[in-house]
Image (cartoon, rainbow, N blue to C red):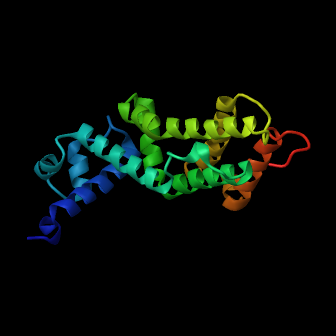
Amino acid sequence: MSLRRRLPGAQRRERILRASIGCFARKGFAGTSTRALASAAGISEAMLFKHFPGKDALYRAILARKIAESEAAMPLGDLARSKEAPGPFLARIAEYILRRVESDPSFLRLFLYSALEGHPLARAFDRARAAGLRREVAGFLRRRGREGALRRVDPTIAARSFLGAVAWFALARALFRDPEIRRIPRGRLVRDLVAIHLEGLRRRGRAS
């Protein structure tokens, strides 16, 4: 009997999840068969179905895993109430997004495939994490605007503008592998993105 067939259930499930993310990232949900998923994980289809009833169950498990990882990396609960100055706060958000995307490009591809295919995973992840991040950043900007540290602009637009810019650079670096963008050190990219946005937000004559 091969070693992979003697793997404990938890390890085999983990192997299936890792292999499935790669398969879905390359061909999307519709283009990936359960046979291909089983083959990538080094198991039979029967063993795959023992752990996951089908592709939808695998997608849900991947979604739950990525939501948990994202929350562990940056809990959303207290972001809006952060005592940081706007510059360090936005830098922390930008660094988090860039680092997460660059370290996990397979999930980015899977997420984009899901959005193009109209699969619920994209909407579910947006509701569970992305929308929460947008809401927390907007809440922070709204509070700091009321406190006088920033101009009073629509915080929802300001948050989406900043996060959208960071997300575009993340895509350019990790997915499109734009050589011009990839040559920029991540630290300098973060500093410049924050500076560009804050110069449009900061009140004249007031430090952030």
Q: Is residue 13 above or below residue 114?
A: below
Which of the two residues, 30 or 147, is positioned nearer the viewer here? 147
Residue 144 in view of the camera:
yes
Q: Is residue 118 above or below residue 171?
A: above
Left or right: 188 as drawn, with respect to 31 = right
The N terminus, quarter of image: bottom left
Q: Residue at x 31, y 41 (%)?
A: 59
Residue 149 pos. (x, y %): 78, 42
Q: Residue furthest front?
A: 147
Q: Residue sitting at 50 percent across and 45 percent down?
A: 77
| Residue at (65, 47) in percent of width and height | 169
Quadrant location of residue 10? bottom left
102 horizontally vs 11: left or right: right
> Which residue lies at the image location 59% right of the left edge and 42% below the top edge?
80
**99 displayed left or right of 39:** right
Q: Position of residue 208 (x, y in %)?
A: 80, 48
The answer to which quarter of the image holds residue 160 is top right
How many marks overall? 0
Mark yes or no: residue 185 visible.
no
Q: Position of residue 81 (x, y in %)?
A: 60, 45
| Residue with the most extreme right position | 205
Q: Quadrant of residue 116?
A: top left
Nearest the camera: 89 or 186?
89
Residue 152: x %, y % from top left: 77, 31
Relative to 73, is 158 on the left or the right? right
